[in-house]
Image (cartoon, rainbow, N blue to C red):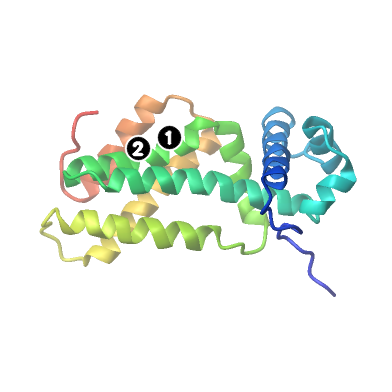
Amino acid sequence: MRKPKLSPRKQTVQARSAVTVEIIVEAATRILEERGLEGYTTNAVTDRAGVSIGSLYQYFPNKDAITIALIHRETADLLADIERASSEDDWRTALALMTDAGVAHQLRRPALARLLDIEEDRLPNHAREKSVVDVIHPALTSVLQKASLETENDLETLAFDVMAITRGMTDMAGIRRELDGVALRARTRQAVFGYLGLTPPRA
Protein backbone atom coordinates (compact mmCIF):
# COMPACT_ATOMS: atom_id res chain seq x y z
CA MET A 1 0.00 0.00 0.00
CA ARG A 2 1.48 3.33 -1.07
CA LYS A 3 1.89 5.94 1.63
CA PRO A 4 0.10 9.26 0.98
CA LYS A 5 2.32 12.15 0.00
CA LEU A 6 2.64 14.81 2.65
CA SER A 7 5.04 17.28 1.06
CA PRO A 8 4.05 20.13 -1.27
CA ARG A 9 3.90 19.18 -4.97
CA LYS A 10 5.54 22.32 -6.34
CA GLN A 11 8.68 24.02 -5.17
CA THR A 12 7.53 27.57 -4.54
CA VAL A 13 10.35 29.31 -6.34
CA GLN A 14 8.39 31.96 -8.13
CA ALA A 15 7.00 34.82 -6.08
CA ARG A 16 3.47 34.16 -7.30
CA SER A 17 3.64 30.53 -6.23
CA ALA A 18 4.94 31.51 -2.80
CA VAL A 19 2.08 33.97 -2.36
CA THR A 20 -0.48 31.37 -3.40
CA VAL A 21 0.90 28.86 -0.92
CA GLU A 22 0.82 31.44 1.87
CA ILE A 23 -2.78 32.34 1.02
CA ILE A 24 -3.77 28.66 1.18
CA VAL A 25 -1.95 28.08 4.47
CA GLU A 26 -3.44 31.19 6.07
CA ALA A 27 -6.90 30.16 4.85
CA ALA A 28 -6.36 26.79 6.52
CA THR A 29 -5.40 28.64 9.70
CA ARG A 30 -8.62 30.64 9.69
CA ILE A 31 -10.76 27.58 9.03
CA LEU A 32 -9.15 25.68 11.91
CA GLU A 33 -9.61 28.60 14.28
CA GLU A 34 -13.21 29.26 13.30
CA ARG A 35 -14.60 25.79 12.57
CA GLY A 36 -12.23 23.36 14.29
CA LEU A 37 -11.13 20.03 12.87
CA GLU A 38 -14.71 19.10 11.94
CA GLY A 39 -15.00 21.98 9.51
CA TYR A 40 -11.45 21.75 8.24
CA THR A 41 -11.78 20.43 4.66
CA THR A 42 -10.00 21.17 1.41
CA ASN A 43 -13.23 22.63 0.01
CA ALA A 44 -13.50 25.00 2.98
CA VAL A 45 -9.86 26.03 2.53
CA THR A 46 -10.25 26.71 -1.19
CA ASP A 47 -13.41 28.74 -0.59
CA ARG A 48 -11.65 30.88 2.03
CA ALA A 49 -8.47 31.20 -0.06
CA GLY A 50 -10.36 32.06 -3.23
CA VAL A 51 -8.57 29.41 -5.29
CA SER A 52 -9.83 26.39 -7.19
CA ILE A 53 -9.45 22.88 -5.87
CA GLY A 54 -7.17 22.20 -8.83
CA SER A 55 -4.90 25.07 -7.85
CA LEU A 56 -4.70 23.78 -4.29
CA TYR A 57 -3.72 20.31 -5.46
CA GLN A 58 -0.96 21.82 -7.57
CA TYR A 59 0.80 22.69 -4.32
CA PHE A 60 -0.61 20.26 -1.74
CA PRO A 61 -1.52 16.62 -2.50
CA ASN A 62 -3.97 16.44 0.41
CA LYS A 63 -5.21 18.18 3.54
CA ASP A 64 -2.52 16.67 5.74
CA ALA A 65 0.14 18.30 3.58
CA ILE A 66 -1.48 21.69 4.23
CA THR A 67 -1.52 20.96 7.95
CA ILE A 68 2.16 20.06 7.93
CA ALA A 69 3.00 23.25 6.05
CA LEU A 70 1.08 25.17 8.71
CA ILE A 71 2.93 23.36 11.51
CA HIS A 72 6.23 24.20 9.84
CA ARG A 73 5.26 27.86 9.58
CA GLU A 74 4.25 28.09 13.23
CA THR A 75 7.39 26.22 14.27
CA ALA A 76 9.58 28.63 12.30
CA ASP A 77 8.04 31.55 14.19
CA LEU A 78 8.70 29.83 17.54
CA LEU A 79 12.29 29.01 16.68
CA ALA A 80 12.98 32.57 15.55
CA ASP A 81 11.72 33.84 18.92
CA ILE A 82 13.83 31.27 20.78
CA GLU A 83 16.99 32.15 18.88
CA ARG A 84 16.42 35.85 19.46
CA ALA A 85 15.91 35.29 23.20
CA SER A 86 18.99 33.07 23.52
CA SER A 87 21.19 35.83 22.10
CA GLU A 88 20.71 38.01 25.20
CA ASP A 89 23.98 38.75 26.99
CA ASP A 90 22.59 38.08 30.46
CA TRP A 91 21.88 34.36 30.85
CA ARG A 92 19.02 34.89 33.33
CA THR A 93 17.28 37.19 30.87
CA ALA A 94 17.95 34.78 28.03
CA LEU A 95 16.51 31.81 29.93
CA ALA A 96 13.45 33.78 31.03
CA LEU A 97 12.77 35.06 27.52
CA MET A 98 13.21 31.60 26.01
CA THR A 99 10.61 30.32 28.46
CA ASP A 100 8.37 33.27 27.63
CA ALA A 101 8.66 32.44 23.92
CA GLY A 102 7.11 29.02 24.52
CA VAL A 103 4.23 30.60 26.42
CA ALA A 104 3.71 33.28 23.77
CA HIS A 105 3.67 30.65 21.03
CA GLN A 106 0.88 28.80 22.80
CA LEU A 107 -1.22 31.88 23.50
CA ARG A 108 -0.64 33.90 20.32
CA ARG A 109 -3.31 31.88 18.54
CA PRO A 110 -4.49 29.50 21.27
CA ALA A 111 -7.21 27.70 19.33
CA LEU A 112 -4.80 27.03 16.48
CA ALA A 113 -2.01 25.89 18.82
CA ARG A 114 -4.36 23.46 20.57
CA LEU A 115 -5.59 21.92 17.32
CA LEU A 116 -2.11 21.66 15.85
CA ASP A 117 -1.01 19.79 18.98
CA ILE A 118 -3.76 17.27 18.25
CA GLU A 119 -2.78 17.01 14.60
CA GLU A 120 0.90 16.54 15.44
CA ASP A 121 0.02 13.46 17.48
CA ARG A 122 -2.03 12.05 14.61
CA LEU A 123 0.29 12.75 11.70
CA PRO A 124 3.32 10.62 10.86
CA ASN A 125 6.78 11.91 11.71
CA HIS A 126 7.38 15.06 9.69
CA ALA A 127 10.56 16.33 11.41
CA ARG A 128 8.82 19.05 13.38
CA GLU A 129 9.97 17.75 16.75
CA LYS A 130 13.46 17.07 15.44
CA SER A 131 13.85 20.64 14.18
CA VAL A 132 12.61 22.05 17.49
CA VAL A 133 14.99 19.93 19.53
CA ASP A 134 17.88 20.60 17.17
CA VAL A 135 17.51 24.35 17.64
CA ILE A 136 16.26 24.77 21.20
CA HIS A 137 18.35 22.16 23.02
CA PRO A 138 21.81 23.47 22.05
CA ALA A 139 20.63 27.05 22.61
CA LEU A 140 19.42 26.17 26.10
CA THR A 141 22.58 24.22 26.87
CA SER A 142 24.68 27.21 25.88
CA VAL A 143 22.65 29.54 28.10
CA LEU A 144 22.85 27.16 31.07
CA GLN A 145 26.60 26.86 30.59
CA LYS A 146 26.91 30.55 31.42
CA ALA A 147 25.03 30.04 34.69
CA SER A 148 27.73 28.00 36.45
CA LEU A 149 25.07 25.88 38.13
CA GLU A 150 25.89 23.65 41.08
CA THR A 151 24.17 20.43 40.08
CA GLU A 152 24.83 16.73 39.79
CA ASN A 153 23.17 16.61 36.37
CA ASP A 154 24.96 17.45 33.16
CA LEU A 155 23.90 20.55 31.25
CA GLU A 156 22.44 18.62 28.31
CA THR A 157 20.10 16.75 30.66
CA LEU A 158 19.11 19.98 32.39
CA ALA A 159 18.33 21.55 29.02
CA PHE A 160 16.06 18.64 28.09
CA ASP A 161 14.34 18.93 31.48
CA VAL A 162 13.74 22.66 30.99
CA MET A 163 12.24 21.94 27.58
CA ALA A 164 9.98 19.28 29.11
CA ILE A 165 8.80 21.62 31.87
CA THR A 166 7.99 24.42 29.45
CA ARG A 167 6.35 22.15 26.89
CA GLY A 168 4.32 20.33 29.52
CA MET A 169 3.00 23.52 31.09
CA THR A 170 2.14 25.19 27.79
CA ASP A 171 0.49 22.05 26.42
CA MET A 172 -1.64 21.74 29.55
CA ALA A 173 -2.54 25.42 29.28
CA GLY A 174 -3.76 24.67 25.77
CA ILE A 175 -5.84 21.73 26.96
CA ARG A 176 -7.34 23.90 29.72
CA ARG A 177 -7.84 26.72 27.21
CA GLU A 178 -6.00 29.12 29.45
CA LEU A 179 -5.72 32.64 28.05
CA ASP A 180 -3.99 34.49 30.90
CA GLY A 181 -0.53 34.91 29.41
CA VAL A 182 0.83 36.93 32.32
CA ALA A 183 -0.06 34.26 34.88
CA LEU A 184 1.15 31.39 32.70
CA ARG A 185 4.42 33.17 31.97
CA ALA A 186 5.02 33.77 35.68
CA ARG A 187 4.26 30.15 36.61
CA THR A 188 6.42 28.75 33.85
CA ARG A 189 9.35 30.97 34.81
CA GLN A 190 8.93 29.93 38.43
CA ALA A 191 8.85 26.25 37.49
CA VAL A 192 11.95 26.45 35.28
CA PHE A 193 14.05 28.60 37.57
CA GLY A 194 12.82 26.74 40.65
CA TYR A 195 13.86 23.42 39.12
CA LEU A 196 17.34 24.86 38.63
CA GLY A 197 17.40 26.14 42.21
CA LEU A 198 17.23 29.76 41.11
CA THR A 199 14.96 32.75 41.51
CA PRO A 200 13.43 34.00 38.25
CA PRO A 201 13.98 37.60 37.22
CA ARG A 202 11.05 39.95 37.47
CA ALA A 203 8.88 40.06 34.37
Front-lying residue, 202 or 199 = 202
For mark 2, what is the residue?
100
Quarter of the C terminus within the rendering: top left
Q: Secondary structure at mark 1?
A: helix
Question: Given the image, on which type of amino acid does mark 2 rest?
Answer: Asp
Front-lying residue, 50 or 150 = 50
Mark 2 Cα within 10 Å, few/some/many (few <14, many 20+)?
many
43 left or right of 27 in image: right
Residue 37: horizontal and vertical position, in percent? 74, 39
Residue 190: horizontal and vertical position, in percent? 26, 38
130 left or right of 57 in image: left
**In the rendered structure, are the residues bearing label 2 and label 1 in contact, judged by CB atoms less than 8 Å apart?**
yes
Q: Secondary structure at mark 2?
A: helix
* Residue located 21% across and 55% down the image: 144
Front-lying residue, 188 or 106 = 106
For mark 1, what is the residue?
104
Quarter residue 161 falls in: bottom left
Front-lying residue, 111 or 17 = 17
* Residue located 79% across and 30% down the image: 48
* Residue located 67% across and 41% down the image: 22
Quarter of the N terminus within the rendering: bottom right
Residue 62: horizontal and vertical position, in percent? 80, 53
Residue 127: horizontal and vertical position, in percent? 56, 63
* Residue located 21% across and 67% down the image: 154
Question: Given the image, on which type of amino acid does mark 1 rest?
Answer: Ala
